[in-house]
Amino acid sequence: MSALLLLRDLLLRLLTPFAIVVFLIEDLLIRRLGHLLGRLAGWPPFARAEAWAASLPPYGALALFLLPSTLIVPEKLLVIALFHSHHYWLAVGVLVGAKLFATAVVGRILSVCYPSLSRLAWFRRADAWVRLTRNRIYGAIKSTVLWQASERLKRKIVEWKPFARLRARRRPEAQRAP
């Protein structure tokens, strides 16, 4: 086996657990934060803002989609200033909080503006490539032993009696099994 193949295999073995953690967190964050922002969309000011965003032409929607990226610059400067003044935990907290907020906002803007953005041929091609690449990576990660073990652990936790009782309490009476 050549040195390049050995290096590739070594990197895959080292980076796979990290990639699994990143994908799990990303999946959880995007789903949960998207759901939370979706609930806010029922509030009239947010509903009006989303209706306005959905009515934008393709390049207007693109500008709105890119806007959160420019708003992150002040946050990065704040993080640098906090690190410089030795407030490390606060800097990490600001960084994580800003990442969560940006993920939620960008995800919501994308879902609202997607019909308009998808009228751009280059955006459809880029979106198809991103989705295909993400699905390939996700498929490779899901085939690993580590992922399968984490899924089994997750099922055991969900089926654990205290959690089963909590789920049963949350279900409406009409949905409970006789």
Image (cartoon, rainbow, N blue to C red):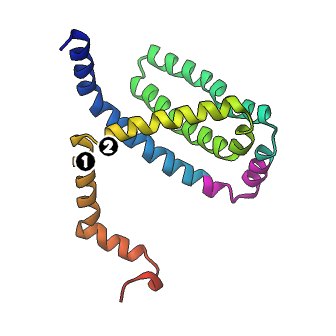
Q: Check the image and report above or below for 105 versus 77.
A: below
Q: Residue at x 27, y 25 (%)?
A: 12
State the extent of the magenta-drawn residues as a range. Answer: 38-51
Viewer-proximal residue, 70 or 88?
A: 70
Residue at horizontal 49 percent and vertical 36 percent from the top? 132
Residue at mark 1: 148
Question: Which residue is found at the position 56% from the left and 49% from the top?
Answer: 34
* Disc number for residue 142: 2
- Using the rendered view, name the quadrant where residue 76 is placed: top right
Direction from residue 88 to residue 53 in the image, left or right: right
Residue 175 in percent (x, y) is at 44, 81
- Which numbered tag is attached to residue 36? none
Q: Residue furthest top?
A: 3
Q: Nearer the viewer, residue 140 or 109?
A: 140
* Mark 2: few/some/many CA within 10 Å (<14, 14-19, 20+): some
- Residue at mark 1 to residue at mark 2: CA–CA distance: 7 Å
Q: What secondary structure is the magenta-colored segment mainly? A: helix
Q: Position of residue 79 (x, y in %)?
A: 50, 21
Q: Secondary structure at mark 2?
A: helix
Give percent across and percent down for residue 119: 74, 38
- Asked whether, in this view, residue 67 is left or right of residue 106, the answer is right
Question: Is 121 in the magenta?
Answer: no
Give residue 110's position: percent from left, percent from top.
64, 41
Residue 49 is covered by the magenta coloring? yes
Q: Disc 1 vs disc 2: Cβ atoms closer than 8 Å? A: yes
Q: Earlier in the sequence, mark 1 or mark 2?
A: 2
